[in-house]
Amino acid sequence: MRVGPTFASRLAPVSDPYEVGREAIRAFAAAVGEPDPVYRDPDAARAQGHPDVIAPPTFVVSLTMRSEVQAAADAFGDIDIADVLHRDQSVVYSRPVRAGDRLVVTSGVSSREVDGRRLLALESDVRTTDGEHVCTTNSAVVYSGPVTR
């Protein structure tokens, strides 16, 4: 599977549910150097109006990337990572990710050619298994390697 000139858009199936745990949030907060106690201490989170610890804003990217790669498998297969440039990323939240959430992700990708390079736009919708919207992520990458199909 390689980037091809006729690649238009793809939608990945809904991901398997991911249960957000306190330890995963704590580990992520430590890894990104986030000192805010709302990411580690349930009492601190409750004092700020949250039912449990919340995840740092970039935590969700660890979930959406898997779904986006699946959606873009036709574009990302067998390419040299040196030919890929991450161009942009944004996340719009309805509410923070919380410990205890069971989240599913649906991702789509569209592609167009600009100046001989393939621009991939990726969008992921993150919801609880009950259907509550948590956030939407958008990212863009540029692939400058050979188009083979």
Image: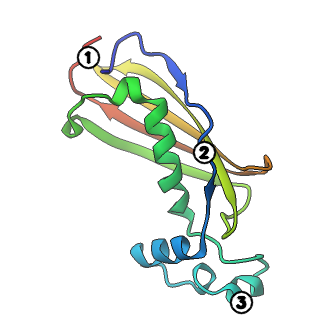
* Pointer 1 residue: 147
Total count of labels = 3
Report the amino acid beneath label 3: Asp
Mark 3 and mark 1 in contact? Answer it, CB < 8 Å: no
Q: Position of residue 133 (x, y in %)?
A: 75, 49
Q: Secondary structure at mark 2?
A: loop
* Pointer 3 residue: 43
* Pointer 2 residue: 16
Check disc 1: other Cα within 10 Å, few if <14, some if 14-19, many if 20+.
some
Q: Position of residue 91 (x, y in %)?
A: 58, 52
Q: Position of residue 11 (x, y in %)?
A: 57, 27
Quadrant placement of the N terminus: top left
Check disc 3: other Cα within 10 Å, few if <14, some if 14-19, many if 20+.
some
Residue at (52, 47) in percent of width and height:
64
For the residues labelled 3 and 1, the Cα–Cα distance comes to 53 Å
Residue at (50, 84) in percent of width and height:
35
Report the amino acid beneath label 2: Asp
Check disc 2: other Cα within 10 Å, few if <14, some if 14-19, many if 20+.
few
Establish if 75 lies above or below 5.
Answer: below
Mark 3 and mark 1 lie on one chain; the one further toward the N terminus is 3
Query: Which of the two marks, 3 or 2, is nearer to us in this view?
Result: 2
- Which coloring applies here? rainbow
Report the amino acid beneath label 1: Val
Mark 2 and mark 1 lie on one chain; the one further toward the N terminus is 2
For the residues labelled 3 and 2, the Cα–Cα distance comes to 30 Å
Mark 3 and mark 2 in contact? Answer it, CB < 8 Å: no
| 110, 16: nearer the viewer | 16
For the residues labelled 2 and 1, the Cα–Cα distance comes to 32 Å
